[in-house]
């Protein structure tokens, strides 16, 4: 019985990830269609490196693009570091490619929330959509397949 619950939980968590991915994608689509834009300037563009060690002692390194930009809305200055909706990290090449798009000093188009100008993005896209969707599907399939094999 406990094993069955763990497979149900695995599938439920997978479903939750899929729902969150879809909601994030809808938010990005809404921003692309309805958020106003303003011009901004990249203030800082650097590679962010994160080292992690799990309980087994296995270490991993992830990389992300850290891009800070400034912009004005209604005469008020803001700074933000969101490239898209959700934080994206992974391989060094992917992060360096993103940094190449946003060098320090570059003029950028900033999409901002008209109800709260502190919320802004450079790209109105769900950056983690594909990853969350893939993991969600894998967890659901694993939960069902393993549950059928064990059960």
Image (tube, rainbow, N blue to C red):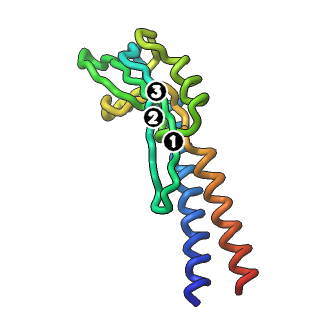
How many angstroms separate mark 3 from mark 1 (CA)? 12 Å
Mark 1 crowdedness (10 Å alpha carbons): few <14, some 14-19, many ≥20: few
Residues at marks 2 and 3 touching, judged by CB atoms closer than 8 Å = yes
Q: Which mark is residue 49?
A: 2
How many angstroms separate mark 2 from mark 1 (CA)? 7 Å
Q: Position of residue 73 (x, y in %)?
A: 31, 19
Describe the element under mark 1 as helix, strand or loop. strand
Q: Which mark is residue 25?
A: none
Mark 2 crowdedness (10 Å alpha carbons): few <14, some 14-19, many ≥20: some
Q: Position of residue 87 (x, y in %)?
A: 47, 40
Viewer-closest of 43 and 124? 43
Write down the residue under mark 1. 61
Instruction: Name the residue: 44% across, 40% down.
Output: 50
Single out the mark in the foreground, 3 or 1. 1
- Drawn side of residue 63 relative to residue 94, left or right: left
| Above or below 28: residue 35 | above
Describe the element under mark 3 as helix, strand or loop. strand
Marked residue nearer the N-terminal end (2 or 1):
2
Instruction: Name the residue: 45% across, 43% down.
Output: 51
In this rendering, the count of numbered labels is 3
Instruction: Name the residue: 50% across, 49% down.
Output: 59
Residues at marks 2 and 1 touching, judged by CB atoms closer than 8 Å = yes
Viewer-closest of 116 and 58? 58
Mark 3 crowdedness (10 Å alpha carbons): few <14, some 14-19, many ≥20: some
Q: Position of residue 61 (x, y in %)?
A: 51, 41
Q: Quadrant of the N terminus?
A: bottom right
| Above or below 105: residue 8 | below
Q: Quadrant of the C terminus?
A: bottom right
How many angstroms separate mark 2 from mark 3 (CA)? 6 Å
Write down the residue under mark 3. 47
Quarter where residue 37 is shown: top left
């Amino acid at each position: 019985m406990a094993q069955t619950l763990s497979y149900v939980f695995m599938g439920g968590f997978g479903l939750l990830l899929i729902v969150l991915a879809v909601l994030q994608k809808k938010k990005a689509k809404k921003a692309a269609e309805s958020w106003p834009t303003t011009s901004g300037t990249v203030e800082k563009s650097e590679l962010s490196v994160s080292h992690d060690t799990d309980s087994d002692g296995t270490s991993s390194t992830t990389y992300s693009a850290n891009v800070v930009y400034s912009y004005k809305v209604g005469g008020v200055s803001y700074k933000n570091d969101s490239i898209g909706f959700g934080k994206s990290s992974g391989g060094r090449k992917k992060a360096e490619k993103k940094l190449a798009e946003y060098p320090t000093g570059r003029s950028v188009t900033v999409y901002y929330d008209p109800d709260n100008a502190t919320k802004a993005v450079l790209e109105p896209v769900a950056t983690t959509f594909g990853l969350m969707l893939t993991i969600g599907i894998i967890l659901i399939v694993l939960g069902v397949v393993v549950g059928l094999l064990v059960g």
